[in-house]
Amino acid sequence: MKAFAISALAATIIACQAGATVKTVSTFAALKAGLESAYPGDVIALSDGTYNATGQITVSAENVALVSAGGKTAATVDGCSLYRILYVSGANFRIEGITFRNAHYAGNGGAISYSSSSVSKTAIIKNCDFIDCTAKYGGAIYAGQNSYTSFEPRENYGIVSGCTFLRCGIDTAGTDDWGGGGAIFGALWVEDSVFDACFCSDMSKNQYHAAIDVTRYATVSNCVFRNHSQTKRGLIGASEIYPETQQNGCVRLVDCIIANNTATDRDDVLFHRKVILDRCVISNNATTVTSTLLSLYRFDASGERGFSKVTSCLFIDNKYPFNMANMPPLLNCTFVRNVGGLACGKETSLNAAITNCVFWGNYEKTSWPNNDQFNGGPGLYWNSQFDLPSLIRIGSTVIEEGVGNGYLYDVLEADSSGKSLALTRAAADRGPGFSNAEKGDWSLKSKSPFVDAGVFMDWMPGAFDLAGKPRLSREAPDLGCFEWMRKASFAVYLK
């Protein structure tokens, strides 16, 4: 993750230079009065301290800014677990360097709610913390009206940048049992932010997407999702609450880390539906569930509009095998040091596709739900009642065979290109050729059997690997999440 300096003071200075009025406030009453009576271009600057809310603040003027000269560690607005803090109906409202704590609203937006898509599309929220904020939709932020019909450039979205969302959640108490987005509900461009321990308050209710519920197309870039333990219907996904958004929502995660999350219910998944993963690290996720195989996705889009896919991702140190049911295509991914890797239960409708992937150095899975028998080995297992080669499409993929109940070569031989079995044997004979796996560097050496061994796919032009190197830099793509690099290496260190 990058480091982002607080720039609220700079924003205030710029506002002064532009001739705007800067009002410095030191009480909640003054804050509320200043924002509600603001003129276009005004800047409201918080003095250091804690501001305990006595009600909601409505911002209706355009081009207003709320900043803190001392930064988010110096200025906190506390909703006292009773109030939404900001309702925004004025376009181009900027918030920077503020901590929002204990905000709550029974409807939409625990800390901040935007009145319309024209308002939320111009929002800027930078370098803010949201702590212990809850609502039915959008525990911290609600921007649910946006109607994007495709992924658009960053400048067309409201921006959330450099923020932290800690213990924000979905709370439907006193309402019906539908809710979504523990931190954010709506289509915003989210970047350089951390989502920590967001939650669904009641796992028996229809509460969707503990971190982000996207109603339409949106991008999440360079973010960390960690320490979640109540994630019914996923940490992240496209909303299925309204029929129209079921068909028109999709979220794209790029350069993100999804780590240290724990499943506590059979409906717990990391991703619900219509989620594209590109250049992400999925690490150290665990489960307390022993009665069933848990999926990476609850639903993907392959049966609807073919949205979801997983490209150039690293799966490392996960404590359970991800069920292949509902799995979107896995393309140029690397699985290392996981317990079991992937597994197929009794899903006869499985239509999995795995291309240019590497499964190596994973751990044996020795016990299965209901004491079922599984074939395979580290990296890939399947229920012995089913013929996996007839249910899976594999191309140019390496799967290390373990010492237990094998049959992995049957799957590799089903590769119509004929490359998977030869590549797996080459890796077994010569080694996979990772640069320095002991120190967390899973990039490739020049003589790795995985270099130039992949097959071309139509998503590759203009795409990059996990280290930011072009996916098509030579004759053919490499296997796994890294392209070979002459000098640079890429180590993964997770705290």
Image (cartoon, rainbow, N blue to C red):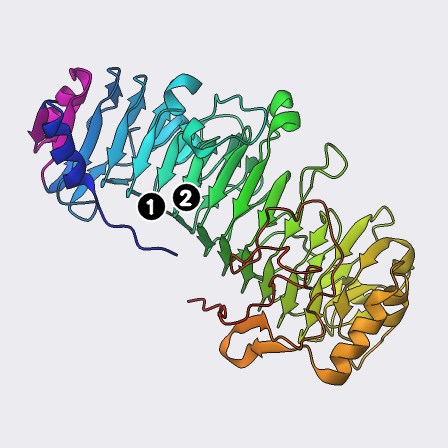
What's under tag 1, amino acid-wise?
Answer: Gly
Residue segment shown in magenta = 22-47
What's under tag 2, amino acid-wise?
Answer: Glu
Task: Quadrant for residue 366, please give it.
Answer: bottom right
- Residue 169 vertical placement versus 488 (above, below): above
Q: Residues within 10 Å of mark 1 (few under 14, many from 20)?
A: many
> Disc 1 designates what residue?
162
- Residue 185 vertical placement versus 268 (above, below): above
Residue under the point 79% across and 66% down: 381
Q: Nearer the viewer, residue 26 or 303?
A: 303
As drawn, is 60 to the left or to the right of 166?
left
- Mark 2 or mark 1, which has the lower sequence index? 1
Q: Please say whether residue 388 is one of the residues in the magenta stretch.
A: no
- Residue 223 vertical placement versus 262 (above, below): above
Task: Quadrant for residue 66, please give it.
Answer: top left
Q: Split into 4 quadrants, where in the image is the C terminus?
A: bottom left
Residue under the point 34% across and 43% down: 132
Task: Quadrant for residue 157, please give it.
Answer: top left
- Secondary structure beneath dot 1 equals loop
What x and y, as percent, mark residue 285?
Answer: 55, 61
As drawn, is 31 to the left or to the right of 442?
left
What x and y, as percent, mark residue 186?
Answer: 48, 30
> Disc 2 designates what residue?
191
Q: Mark 2 and 1 residues: CB-CB less than 8 Å, in contact?
A: yes
Asked whether residue 112 appears in the rendered view, the answer is: yes
Residue lying furthest front: 475
Q: Nearer the viewer, residue 366 or 406?
A: 406
Q: Split into 4 quadrants, where in the image is the N terminus?
A: bottom left
Q: Please say whether residue 35 is one of the residues in the magenta stretch.
A: yes
As drawn, is 385 to the left or to the right of 89?
right
Number of disc labels: 2
As drawn, is 451 to the left or to the right of 388?
left
